[in-house]
Amino acid sequence: MLKWVRNNLTMDQESVERIAHKYGTPLYLYSRSQIAENYRKFDRAFSSVPHLICYALKANSNLSVARVLSRQGAGTDIVSGGELYRALKAGFDPEKIVFSGVGKTKEEMVYALRVGIFLFNVESIEELRTLDQVAASLKKKAPIAIRVNPDVDVGTHRHITTGTAENKFGIHKNYIEESYRAARSLKHIQIKGIQAHIGSQITSVAPFLTLLKLLLNFVEKLAKNGIPLQTIDVGGGLGISYNEERPPDPKDLAQSFLPLLKNKRWTLLFEPGRFLVGNTGILVTKVLYRKSSSHKTFVIVDAAMNDLARPALYDAYHEIVPLRQRKGEKKVVDVVGPICESGDYLARARTMLFPEKGELLAIKNVGAYGFAMSSQYNSRPRAAEVIVEKNRVSLIRKRETFPDLIHGEK
Ligand SMILES: *Cc1c(COP(=O)(O)O)cnc(C)c1O
């Protein structure tokens, strides 16, 4: 957790500045206690019903970050064979792994069936048939849920909406019943549940409640047709507060969900990513230069869009604060990185304390889709990652070196 102590930014009682001096910048820094607390908040809210929280590994797949969650008892939602590999290394129980994604390959299916994952979230009939064949070749049954495209708009950024008919995800709600009938006819498919994931950074309860009702409606219809389901998975997407947003708490979700689930035996599944890790990380960066033109003032820092893509990609807002609170003049600035792209910015037209040359800044709420989306674009070695645990600061990913940049090349 971030706290000011005598005007210095600390994370779980450790000075961020001291950590930054030790490990250099740009630097991702995470709070273990915050990750665990976020998980427990979610878990507690639904303690009165059978449930499983499957952390969406893509949000932050660092082994040590993921391990905090696997130790808490979380499952995980994976979207590739590579993520399955990571999930196992991070200690997740295969029986708590669900596998999403529109393009699972046969090789990935074999891997997941051998490992014995909990569920495949199937996103097309062709995928379903392929999975049946792959399972047959291994003499196994593949446990599945069908991902519904509910065609609901959740009002978030176009690039992070996933539940409308325009998106590639899931099977459209009009074809769900025939899909389950098809699944039932396949010998190596075991029908377990139903799933949907409608988008990310959702800041109200309403879309989730609409979704749950729609899924329950399917569950009842299918049961009447002799296809009983055991799991109902409402996906991820719960938002966090980056700026002024006031997203609901898991408790608020539970309050509207639980009356609909009373005396039922279904297991409720969630796939939160951002909610569990988003507010647990900061990106520490150093001011390299400042400059002004007639129109603008730029603050050039040593982190860039290759380290944090969200502002360039989604126009995302991340609060930026100096590591030492001080008085000074405020200015409207663009905070930009060294990459040769005009889109390389971390904040645009931001009113902030005008940073000094060499000053260290923290870009907040970057625990989700931060490092995970980083790249080596412009041949920039990726940043180091550090976690603060109880009285201990641990390097959990080394800063990349120049030889790392050409690894595997000829
Ligand atoms: C990305 C994703 C999630 C997690 O979304 P958040 O907004 O980070 O909670 C969950 N399920 C699926 C299928 C996803 O693709």
Image (cartoon, rainbow, N blue to C red):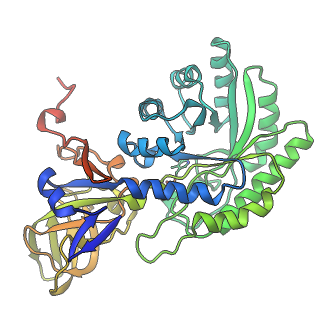
Residue 382 screen position, x and y as percent: 22, 45
Q: Residue furthest front?
A: 391
Q: Residue furthest right?
A: 224
Taking the spot 55% from the left edge, 69% from the top edge, the residue there is 203
Choose between 386 and 331: the one closer to the eye: 386
**In the image, residue 241 above or below residue 108:** below
Q: Is residue 150 left or right of residue 305?
A: right
**Count the marks: how many?**
0
Choose between 179 and 95: the one closer to the eye: 95
Taking the spot 53% from the left edge, 41% from the top edge, the residue there is 76
Residue 384 screen position, x and y as percent: 22, 47
- Locate residue 336: give its quadrant: bottom left
On-image quarter of the N terminus: bottom left
**In the image, residue 256 above or below residue 29:** below
Taking the spot 20% from the left edge, 70% from the top edge, the residue there is 323
Q: Is residue 124 left or right of residue 393?
A: right
Choose between 382 and 118: the one closer to the eye: 118
Q: Is residue 316 visible?
A: yes
On-image quarter of the C terminus: top left
**In the image, residue 109 above or below residue 44:** above
Residue 228 screen position, x and y as percent: 84, 38
- Locate residue 199: give its quadrant: bottom right
Taking the spot 40% from the left edge, 42% from the top edge, the residue there is 61
Choose between 339 and 198: the one closer to the eye: 198
Residue 328 screen position, x and y as percent: 15, 86
Q: Is residue 274 visible?
A: no
Q: Is residue 141 left or right of residue 406?
A: right
